[in-house]
């Protein structure tokens, strides 16, 4: 590729397109801790407390008669960030393929599976 494009080695990749990237012998780990902190700052929630979801069904809520309606779309992305900025979502893919593995028709045979955590997704 270096014959066609100008390339340079800038060290190990640690940040790319807003994602923090950590590479180790156990795999590649990606998180958005910096983005999460920026979200909390934008909505003035840096000192907020964690809240269990779903909340207790015994909790009684009162309507805030003096409160103003808010645009709920602005807050939909804030369901986990405060105390879980290093929330781990582990994905793993595995594939197997061969060339002309079918003895009669010489077709390639392949397969794959994707996991999210320990659960098979596809």
Image (spheres, rainbow, N blue to C red):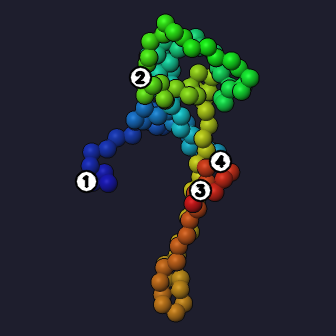
Q: Is residue 21 above or below residue 90?
A: above
Q: Secondary structure at mark 1?
A: loop
| CB contact under 8 Å: marks 4 and 2 | no
Residue appearing at x 58%, y 28% in the figure: 80
Point out the tag, 2 or 1, that comes first from the N-terminus. 1
Residue receiving disc 2: 71
Contact, mark 4 vs mark 3 (Cβ under 8 Å): no
**Quadrant into which the N terminus falls:** bottom left
Mark 2 or mark 3: name the one nearer the start of the chain.
2
Residue on which disc 3 sits? 121
Q: Earlier in the sequence, mark 1 or mark 4?
A: 1
Q: Nearer the viewer, mark 1 or mark 4?
A: 4
Residue identifier under label 4: 117
Q: In front here: 90 or 58?
A: 58
On the image, the x and y values in percent for residue 82 come to 59, 21
Residue located 31% across and 44% down the image:
7
Asked if residue 45 is positioned above or below residue 75 in the image, the reply reads above
Q: Is residue 46 shown to the viewer in this render?
A: no
* CA–CA distance in space, label 1 to label 4: 39 Å
Disc 2 versus disc 3: distance between alpha carbons? 34 Å
């Amino acid at each position: 590729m270096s014959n066609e494009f100008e390339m340079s080695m800038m060290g190990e990749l640690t940040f790319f397109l807003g994602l923090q990237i950590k590479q180790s012998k156990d795999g590649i780990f990606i998180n958005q801790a910096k983005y999460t902190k920026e979200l909390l700052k934008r909505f003035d929630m840096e000192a907020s407390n964690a809240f269990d979801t779903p909340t207790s069904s015994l909790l009684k809520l009162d309507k805030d008669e003096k409160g103003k309606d808010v645009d709920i779309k602005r807050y939909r992305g804030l369901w986990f960030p405060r105390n879980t900025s290093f929330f781990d979502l582990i994905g793993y893919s595995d594939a197997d393929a061969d060339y002309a593995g079918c003895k009669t028709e010489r077709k390639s045979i392949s397969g794959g599976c994707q996991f999210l955590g320990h659960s098979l997704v596809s």
